[in-house]
Amino acid sequence: MTRSDFSSTAGRGVAASVLASVLFGAISLLGGHLDGFTPVETTAWRVLFLLLALGAVHASTSARRRLKTITKRIARSPKLIVIVLLNAAIMWVQLWVFMWGPANGHAQDIAFGYFLLPLVMVVVGRIFFHDRLRPLQWWAVAAAVVGVLAQAIIAGGVNWPVLIIAGLYPIYFALRRWTGIDSMQVFFIEIILLVVPAVVVLVVPYVADPDRGIPTTWPAVLLMAILSAVAMICYILASRLLPLSLFGLLSYLEPVLVLGASLLLGEVLGVADVFVYVPIVIALVLLGLSGRRRRRDHLEEPPL
């Protein structure tokens, strides 16, 4: 891979990450207006629309061929089977907690989880995958640490949704990269595995109560599911195109947007929250400056 190829790949990865963050912010806002649907049901709808979107992505002959090849590789390896099953379970939990938070007044906990997630991703990428950070990116990490510590002090600890987001996602992405199955095809396989529980979740309530009607908020659920499908595909694409550390740092845009959604849903920030979000904004600005410098002088060697 040449330096220009690496720059182009990184540019696509950054664009995919930013688009995913914007869409996740919109989904979080919609999550507070889905009366009549439980978080488990909205998660199931997200899975079904992800299946449709990924099916369209894999409609070409070459994509189906790659899917067949990776499926055979996984089927022949008990280790890969276990990892794919584990990652599918992690993905279901992550999809669910993202819908549960806004619907239950915990949107700020979800935002805090995504504030902490990039730091964990940076640590994982640096220790296990030897990712290199530019000086401005190290300063961005330092600013983000200040913001996260301030949030932990203000909140009086770390709630369980935070631990789910910041603890499980790094495991998910690290396992994919470590085993060499970090591809859109494997994500498709994971979603296929989640279709069975998704269908059960959606069908069982109507079997138990045949007279149950369709909630009037179904258009919002439909829009949420469509946006979710596009957002997750962009998120997985960004994870493949970027070093794990840079991918993690760029994820700071998402909690800022999720936080904005939480404010629109009625949650309130205090004066002390300035100590949280000002450092996070500084971290994002430093990342933007680092990205411009990377494109200008290509000082960092491209990965092989």
Image (cartoon, grey):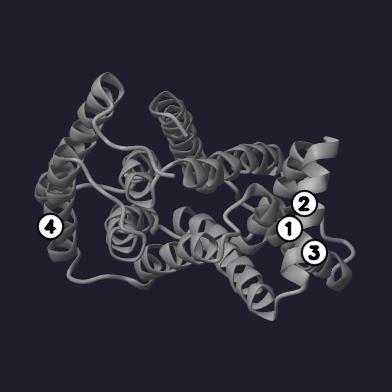
The answer to whether the residue labelled 1 contacts the one labelled 2, judged by CB atoms less than 8 Å apart, is: yes
Taking the spot 80% from the left edge, 38% from the top edge, the residue there is: 62
Q: Which amino acid does label 2 sit on?
A: Leu
How many angstroms separate mark 1 from mark 3 (CA)?
Answer: 5 Å
The answer to whether the residue labelled 1 contacts the one labelled 3, judged by CB atoms less than 8 Å apart, is: yes
Disc on the earlier residue, 1 or 4: 1
How many angstroms separate mark 1 from mark 2 (CA)?
Answer: 5 Å
The label on residue 70 is 1
How many angstroms separate mark 4 from mark 3 (CA)?
Answer: 48 Å
Residue in front for this viewpoint, 225 or 244: 244
Q: In this view, does 209 lie above or below 229?
A: below
Q: In this view, does 258 lie to the left or right of 72?
A: left
Q: How crowded is the residue under tag 4: few (<14 C-alpha within 10 Å), some, or many (20+)?
A: some
Q: How crowded is the residue under tag 1: few (<14 C-alpha within 10 Å), some, or many (20+)?
A: some
Disc on the earlier residue, 2 or 4: 2
The label on residue 67 is 2
Taking the spot 83% from the left edge, 35% from the top edge, the residue there is: 60
**SS for tag 3?**
helix
The answer to whether the residue labelled 1 contacts the one labelled 4, judged by CB atoms less than 8 Å apart, is: no
Relative image position of residue 114 (x, y in whole percent): 35, 54
